[in-house]
Structure formats: structure tokens, C-alpha cells
Image (cartoon, grey):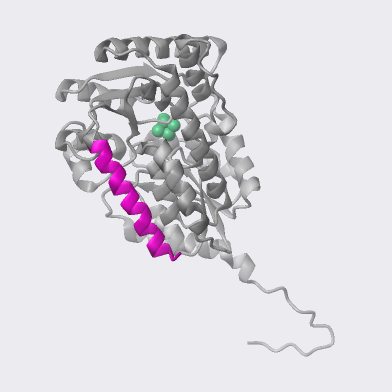
Amino acid sequence: MKNKQLLKQIDAFSVAEMERLGKENKVAAYFCRQFPPEILAGLGFHPARILSGAVPSAEREGEKYVRPDACPYCKSILGNMSLKKGILGKASIIAAVATCDMMRRTLDTMRKEFDIPIFTIHAPATISENTRKFFISQMQGLVEEISSFVGENFNSRKALDYFKSRKKIAVKLYRISLSGNVPHSVLSRLIHLFNFSSPIRLDRFLDQVIENIPKQKPKIKILLVGSALCMEDSCVPSFIELSGAGLVNLTCSGINQLEGYLDASASNGRGGTAECIAKFAEIILDAPQCIRSRPNNAVYDRIKSYVSKTGVDGVILKTLKFCDLWNTEKERMREFLGIPFLVLDTDYSGSSDESLKNRIDAFVETLEAPRNIQPQKSTKGTKQTRL
Ligand code: SF4
């Protein structure tokens, strides 16, 4: 199957899933992968992670509510809430982990400005015995709160079924993500579906298309780290794809949100509701840590291990303007990794696309250069000619 045909098939499935979601009357939006969607499924909601809607009009609209120098992701959330666009326009509740100051302010603004119930917990930056217990108890409290709000008990069976289907998808997507041989245009669409579509339907769909995914043989591979990528925020990976390089997406919109499922197992639900909720909170705590964790040495070590595991030639750190989480790490990371490293600070306006493309092309060229130098033939006994 040609790439174009496959993209059409994925887009058609995606549109159908969005239409279905539009007809649901219980959609719960969440933002960060440090929130377990299984909890929302157990409460009878259709969980949908907001990694879409990153368009200039949403960002501009968001600036009516926060300062222009807020992070583009948070501005687009507020903009889409205001315009009632995309998944946020269909959400009946929001469940969030407060991960940074800007996200906390965004949630406060949403409470003030929009008529939507918001349930929040705090994700610990430092994992210890005490913070683990605290996170689990917050999760139990959140379930009670939402449960009394909707008048429905938490259903462990529903949460476990949701987890099992999602795990099956995560295993499949992780395998193809790791190779760096799958075009970003295909992979990003499939991973985006992981954020909002029904896992049962997506798993079936994946089985239909997975064998038809074209494989590239890129000479150069790049590891992408940094802020989460929204669906429309695709210029960096698209320019990498256009340059002919392969891409391994190690952001929390790529491999990081899949890996936590690989070795995770949830009990059969016989331990009761509290045990089931605790288990989903623990799965989040045991998943690869985010750069916001303190200390974050494990994040660095993990990136390094992916450099050798995937055999990439260079690393691109894509940050979002005014988001300090990744921005403040760039020099330490450059030094630590010790391989070609490029930092790209981006927003959703599209105004720097041309310069981003030039910088990516130049980076790929420098990575290719050593490979293009042919080993010199021995000149012993031959006359050298100067070209
Ligand atoms: S970068 Fe960290 S805080 Fe931000 S969405 Fe990803 S996991 Fe959450």
C-alpha cells in the first residue's frame, strides 16, 4: 500500500473517531501523561488527552486570558476552551495534574473563565515513599470527588479493560517507534489516535494497517527529545522526514507515553476499588520520569541509553517558547550527551518555519558529512593528482 493511501485510511479512521467522540456525552479531557486515563474510564468517561488544537488562532485567542509570554501549549488550551474547538469543545470535565506553574495558572484561569468542572491533583517532582503514598491518596480522593459529582461509582472492571486494550496498542506502537524507520507522517497520526480514540477500535484498526506501514532506510537517524508535540505542531518532525533522516520520538507524546505500559500489569480487580485505583497511580509513578522530576539524572541516563539502543546519529531538543521545563536543561544536556545536538525553540505561529527547516537541513548535512567522506585509497607508488 502506498504511503498516501495509508495516510488517507488513517485520517478517515481518525475523523470517524472524532465524530464518535462528539456524540459521547461523557468526555473527560486530560493533558499530561502523568494522569492515568484508566481512572476516567473506570468512572464511565471517554478519556481524551489534549495533544491537538495547536494552531495560531487558538494561541492568539489564549492571549486574551494570559500574558503573551505564556507557553504556547497553555495558551492554545485556553484558546480552544474559549472557541469551543476540538476535543476541549466536547469535554464535560477536565482532570489534570498540576505539573508546572503555567499549567497551574492555566487551570485557575479555566476555573474562573469557563463553565466546566475541573478536578486537579499534584504530581510529585520527587519520588519517595511519602510522595508515592501522597499521590495515591490524592488519586483516591479525586475518584471520590468525580464519582460524587457524576453520581456513578468507580468500576474497576471498566478501568482494567481499558488498560488491557491500551497496553496492547502501546506494545505495538512502541515497537515501530523504536526502529526510526517509519515515516513520521504515519507514526504521529497513529500515536495521536492513542490519545483520544477507543482503544478497542484502535487495536483492531492497527492490526489492519500495521503490515502496510512503509519502512524507510534512512542513512541518518535523529532522536527527538523535549516538550510534548501536539498533532499540528509537526514542522520539526516533518522537516526531519523531508530531509530524509529517520526519527525516534522520545517525547511524552511519543515513546515516553508508551513505555510505561510495557512492563505494567494491573490486578484482576478482585482486590477492590481502592487497590485498583492505587495500582493505576503506581503505574504512573513507575513510568519513565519527566524532565520536571527532581533530581532528573535518570531522565538524562535514559536519553543516553536510547542514543545507544537506537543508534541515532544526533539529538534534537525541541522546546516550546517560554516553557522552562526543557529550556533550562539545554546546556547541561548538550554537555552530557556528547553527540551532535541541536536546540530548536518553537511556537505554534509558523513564523519561524523557514529558519527551522534550514537549521534542520544543515544539522542533517553535518551528520551525513562523515559518512560521505570516502576512505582514502592508498597513494603508495601512485602519482597524486591535485583536483
Ligand atoms: S513534559 Fe512532563 S509535564 Fe509536560 S506534558 Fe510531558 S510528562 Fe507532562
Does residue 374 sit above or below 155 in this rendering? below
Q: Nearer the viewer, residue 295 or 141?
A: 141
Q: Does any portion of residue 356 appear in the rendered image? A: no
Kindly tell me whether residue 335 is visible in this rendering. yes
The front one of 294 and 207 is: 207
Asked whether residue 21 is drawn in magenta, I would say yes
Q: Nearer the viewer, residue 141 or 333?
A: 141
Q: Could you say where residue 361 lies in the image, as x and y percent from the top left?
A: 45, 63
Pick the quarter of the image with the N terminus: bottom left
Residue ID at (34%, 19%): 43
Q: Is residue 335 left or right of residue 160?
A: right
Residue 291 at x, y percent in the picture: 49, 32
Asked whether 340 or 125 is in front, the reply is 125
Tag count: 0
Q: What type of secondary structure mainly makes up the magenta span?
A: helix
Q: Left or right of 344: which side holds 120?
A: left
Which residue is situated farthest in the right direction here? 381
- At horizontal 38% and vertical 44% (from top left) the residue drawn is 192
Residue at image coords 42%, 37%: 200
Res 217 quadrant in image: bottom right
Please tell me in which quarter of the rendered image ligand 1 is found: top left
Position of the C terminus, as image quadrant, is: bottom right
49 left or right of 247?
left
Position of residue 189 relative to residue 49, above or below, is below
Figure quadrant of residue 128: top right
Magenta stretch contains residue 182? no
Residue 271 pos. (x, y %)? 53, 10
Q: Is residue 154 left or right of residue 80?
A: right
Give the residues in magenta. Answer: 1-22
As drawn, 268 above or below 358: above
Q: Position of residue 202 (x, y in %)?
A: 41, 42
